[in-house]
Image (cartoon, helix red, strand yellow):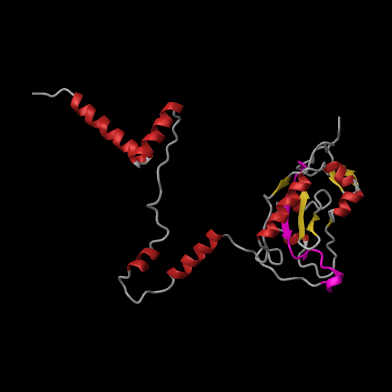
Amino acid sequence: MASNRKPTLGGLIPPQAQRPVALAPQSEKRWVFSFRFWKQIKNFGLDQSDSKWFIALLEKLADLSKLKQEHFLKDGVDRDNWRFHKIHWQQKNIPVQRKDLDWIPGTYLDNETEYELFQFQITQSLGRVIGFFDENQEFNIVLLDPLHNMQPSKSFDYKVHSCKPDSTHYADLLKDVEKAQKHNCFLPECPAYIELCRLPRTDHAHMISIMRLPEETYIQMRDCIDRHNSTIEDILEYGMMLMDHTSKKDSPHLD
């Protein structure tokens, strides 16, 4: 029976007694990635990364996903081509230390021997991906480093290039709304200001019902919607009204 071991640059090492325990590597296992521990922090943000950078990142992850993990880790040529190596925490001007990655569970963060952090390149000019192998041999991406800040280069005088966390369109919208709500309108009855202060509204919530329809019924429903320029809600409402009318018509009347 194969013993529990995990991949490292030097080959395979036995795990420590701590849990979780790394599974025995499988020669056919390919790279698998997880973003559960990914985070943006100062100097490792995406505020200066455009769409082409993200395309390059996804393409590289796709390429690496096709490779067999154990062969890659044993092959020096592959590792060199991908600039794959463990993080050198003593690098001059490195802007972060392992202990600073405090959102990673202590099971991993406090066990540096078993769960070393590594990096590999997106391209030579587009930065690096930083993460570690967990007990299931999944590579957990911890930081994205588009500006090469994790290992400052002597060629650029060990300079750290400034970047910061970026946000989503939705998060930006919420910030804009919050900022607008702090302003007072000159007109106390201004309808725009009144509506703005009511945000977020709760009257946009809808009850949801999932129905399994026979194919013939579904086709008839779609045809009815197209012919009458109506909606599913219209059909349901009309059907319920018709059922109520029919029920009242058929009910016995007392003299």
Is 233 rendered above or below residue 126? Answer: above
Q: Is residue 142 a member of the stretch shown in magenta?
A: yes
In the image: residue 101, left or right of residue 235: right
Is 215 rendered above or below residue 68? Answer: above
In the image: residue 144, left or right of residue 177: right
Quarter of the figure with residue 246 = top left
Measured as percent of width and height from the top left, residue 195 is found at: 36, 63
| Front one among 70 and 111 | 70
Q: Residue drawn 40% across and 56% down?
A: 201
Q: Residue furthest front?
A: 227
Quarter of the figure with residue 39 = bottom right
Measured as percent of width and height from the top left, residue 86 is found at: 84, 55
Quarter of the figure with residue 229 = top left
Measured as percent of width and height from the top left, residue 182 is found at: 44, 71
Q: Is residue 163 a member of the stretch shown in magenta?
A: no
- Do we see residue 106 in this rendering? no
Magenta part of the chain: 134-158
- Do we see residue 94 in this rendering? yes
